[in-house]
């Protein structure tokens, strides 16, 4: 599902500053593909957080014009928080912050789809829903589908907002994100953002996105320990803030 936007025209239509945060650990092969897909004319800075890579991911990102932040403490949330700390020092700060993975599973060229509800003023926080979109066969493992469906169901029941996915591809207003007090350093970061945003009354929207098989083995869904750890942490996070 390719983005149907003329990105140059879309960029001229608004003056919002968009920065992108990409957590990355040992993604030297897939990261260049992500950056090639990303509509850079819509983006001021791409913040790649090198989360303990040993394969030269950080150097590769720097060679492609990204701002590289080194966060040796491993964990998805740790990487995202390090990226946000970098953005907090920017002058001016961004208006919108996008998050996507470095493994080329997200279709970075679909960023305009996520930006559109924010640009039009209809939303403060947009999540790319793989459940509403199309996934390549094998892109979402059975445990991922089950975990996402369960988490989305619980959020709907506990928070009263229709949620279909906890996908990593998302965009949120910087001023709103800054007030959420994000703190989770590992698997619960995405769930924390969603439930805190809903409790804070942010206007929430989802748009369909495409999803492909990631390059290489998943560091979470690809292992039993990662799958169980992520599932427990996500459920804990959903109930914690209810």
Image: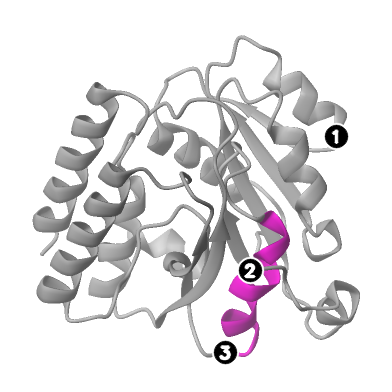
Report the quarter where the C terminus lies: bottom left
- Displayed quadrant of residue 148: bottom left
* Helix, strand or loop at mark 1: loop
Instruction: Tell which circle, 2 or 1, labels the residue nearer the N-terminal end.
Output: 1
Q: CA distance from mark 2 to mark 3?
A: 12 Å
Disc number for residue 95: 2
> Mainly helix, strand or loop, the magenta region?
helix
Q: Considering depth in this image, is 67 or 150 the residue closer to the camera?
A: 150
Q: Find disc 1 in the rendering and name its residue.
A: 64
Q: In the rendered image, is residue 205 in sight?
A: yes
Residues at marks 2 and 1, CA–CA distance in whole angstroms:
23 Å
Q: Are marks 2 and 3 in contact (CB under 8 Å)?
A: no
Q: Which residue is mark 3?
A: 121
* Stretch of the chain drawn in magenta: 108-120
SS assignment at label 2: loop
Mark toward the start of the polypeptide (3 vs 1): 1
């Amino acid at each position: 599902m390719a983005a149907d936007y003329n990105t140059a025209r879309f960029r001229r239509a608004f003056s919002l500053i968009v920065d992108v945060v990409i957590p990355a650990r040992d993604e030297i092969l897939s990261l260049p593909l992500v950056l090639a897909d990303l509509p850079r004319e819509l983006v001021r800075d791409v913040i790649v957080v090198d989360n303990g890579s040993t394969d030269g991911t950080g150097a590769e990102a720097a060679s492609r014009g990204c701002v590289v932040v080194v966060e040796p403490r491993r964990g998805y949330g740790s990487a995202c928080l390090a990226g946000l700390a970098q953005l907090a020092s920017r002058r001016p700060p961004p208006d919108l912050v996008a998050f996507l993975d470095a493994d080329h599973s997200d279709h970075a060229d679909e960023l305009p789809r996520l930006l559109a509800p924010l640009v039009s003023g209809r939303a403060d926080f947009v999540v790319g829903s793989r459940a509403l979109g199309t996934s390549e066969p094998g892109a979402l493992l059975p445990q991922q589908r089950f975990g996402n469906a369960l988490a989305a169901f619980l959020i709907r029941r506990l928070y009263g907002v229709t949620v279909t996915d906890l996908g990593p591809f998302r965009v949120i207003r910087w001023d709103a994100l800054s007030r959420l007090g994000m703190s989770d350093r590992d698997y619960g970061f995405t769930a924390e953002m969603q439930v805190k945003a809903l409790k804070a009354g942010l206007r929430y929207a989802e748009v369909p996105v495409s999803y492909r098989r990631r390059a290489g083995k998943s560091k979470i869904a690809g292992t039993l320990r990662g799958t169980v750890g992520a599932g427990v942490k996500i459920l804990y996070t959903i109930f914690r803030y209810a």
